[in-house]
Image (cartoon, rainbow, N blue to C red):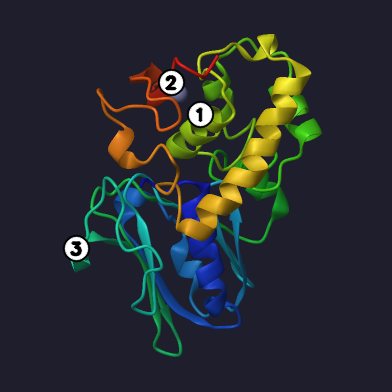
Amino acid sequence: MVPEGLEVEIWSQAAQVLVGRQIATVRVDPRCGGVGAEVLGGALIEGVSRRAKTLIIDTDHGLLGVHFGMTGRLVIDGHSPITSLEYGSARDLADWDRCIIEMVDGGITRVNDPRRWSRYEIVVDDPAAVVCTAPMFGPFGPDALSITASQLGDALGQRRRALKACLLDQSCVAGLGNMCADEVLWRADLDPRRPVHLLSGDEIDHLAGVIASTLPEMLRAGGSHMGQISPGLRRVGALCPRDGYPLDVATVAGRTTVWCRGHQR
Ligand SMILES: [Zn+2]
């Protein structure tokens, strides 16, 4: 899978072991951003959290924001809670390390990213600066892992864009990626191409309920590849697991989208 909010949530939970530890040095591949990373040398890690698909390492010298791109993978003290990604590699070459955080205690946390699309931003303690460094730090809509029906209704509003486009727009709903968006729309019986302003209140409530039940289930199962529209069904000729109808595979909202004309309306 490509890192979506679920993968970053898994990494964020695993990275809680970093809290309270002191950074010795931070090195970032200059092709991936991370200007000013040296200010984090000697900093104490005060918290690790996720905002949308960004991992935020909060220190007493400032914030390090990590966006994993398509193939970035977090390795903490030699262990990765997610070993392979759909477009990544099961290999772990030192040349692919784009960000290396060395701890005073000798531990090393790094982002291994074969395609070099991961991005890093340093924000020195100035809350106003966080707002300015979009899109890594927002603005974000309500997070998909906690969104309520009324928040979803407000976030979607009367937009005329395709429903899937709105779900992938992090300023509308934060944290959903391509596979999770396809999964929740498949489970909610909604066509990804439907213009949002034509959805009924009941349909939005139903979608919110599906998001609320589906994402924790996929998180427990291991991430965004653990839906019923599994990676193996993301191809022409695959059949809908619910009704056996041939699944559609086409570009919607600029992304490869899989859906079923048989039951998604
Ligand atoms: Zn179907």
Percent position of residue 219, x then y:
53, 55
Decide if ligand 1 comes within 8 Å of the CB at mark 2.
yes
Going from N to C along the chain, the mark reached first, 2 or 1, is 1
Mark 1: give few (<14), some (14-19) or many (20+) Cα within 10 Å: many
SS label for mark 3: loop
Percent position of residue 207, x then y:
66, 30
Query: Mark 3 and mark 2 in contact (Cβ < 8 Å)?
Result: no
Percent position of residue 217, x then y:
56, 52
Apparent side of residue 172 relative to residue 75 in the rendered image (left or right): right
Say above or below: 182 vs 27: above
> What residue is pinned by disc 1?
186
> Residue at horizontal 25%, vertical 23%?
236
Percent position of residue 130, x then y:
64, 49
- From the viewer's side, name the closer residue of 29 and 197: 197
Mark 3: give few (<14), some (14-19) or many (20+) Cα within 10 Å: few
> What residue is pinned by disc 3?
91
Query: Mark 1 and mark 2 in contact (Cβ < 8 Å)?
Result: yes
> What residue is pinned by disc 2?
260
> Residue at horizontal 73%, vertical 15%?
200
Viewer-nearest of discs 2 and 3: 2
**Kind of residue indicated by mark 2:** Cys
Say above or below: 149 vs 79: above
**In the rendered image, which quarter contains the C terminus?**
top right
